[in-house]
Amino acid sequence: MGPAHKARDDGVYGGERVSSAPPLSLKLLNSMNQTGFTTALGFAFELSPWVVERAWDERPFASVEAMHTAMMAVLDASTTADKLALIRAHPELASKAAIAKQLTAESNAEQASAGLDRLTPEEFARFHDLNAAYRERFGFPFIICVRLNDKASILAAMHARLSNDEATEIVEAIQQIGLISKLRLLDSVTT
């Protein structure tokens, strides 16, 4: 873990807050209708607000952690096709779209926090080659919680995970999405 990543008081390690929206209170979120709740938090799961929408039924949430647990339960109970759609909604790391800041605001900020927006030409080529090899092998983008990593650890993980089978990588991608979404929620919700 790089020096920019520090322990938070909630026990989660992460970089700086990446959300630009003002935090919402858990009390307010618990009082929202399903549309408002989904609109407010749909960003937590990359271009996949259906996860948040389906968790709404579990309100009221006692904590942000309980809310995230309910969202992950939705994801765990979803079909493989839905999980793959969520995984495929994520951008490739250090892609041309990322460099051009054409991702969601959250993804742009998260990739920048790991320095992926400031790669040397050699680093960019290495990411490009590993992204291509990974997508060729698994049919979806490599996913890692970049806020908990730096360039070197991301590259090492990409290389190591290429030897996994598809089922293992789906499980790993969902676990990483869980970390990404939890950090996004912790950034955006106050208790």
Image: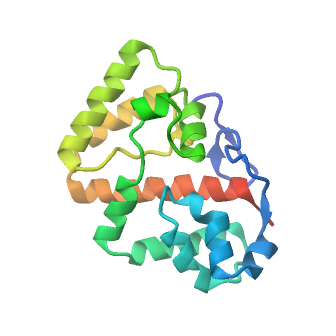
- Please determine whether, in this image, residue 156 is positioned above or below residue 87: above
Identified at 72% across, 71% down, the residue is 63
Count how many numbered circles sit on residues in the image: 0
Furthest residue in direction bottom, as rendered: 57
Percent coordinates x, y for residue 57 in the rendering: 59, 86
147 sits to left or right of 166: right
Report whether residue 70 is seen: yes
> Can residue 94 be seen by looking at this rendering?
no
Residue found 52% across the figure and 66% down from its top: 49
Is residue 180 placed above or below 158 in the rendered structure? below
Horizontal and vertical percent position of residue 120: 44, 14
Dividing the picture into quarters, in which one does residue 186 lie? bottom right
- Quarter of the image for the N terminus: give it: top right
Q: Position of residue 105 (x, y in %)?
A: 60, 44
- Going by the image, does 130 lie left or right of 103? left
Q: In percent of the image, x 18 and y 44: which residue is there?
A: 137
Question: Which of 99 and 57 lies nearest the eye of the viewer?
Answer: 99
Left or right of residue 99: residue 141? left
Position of the C terminus by quadrant: bottom right
Question: Which of 75 and 37 lies nearest the eye of the viewer?
Answer: 37
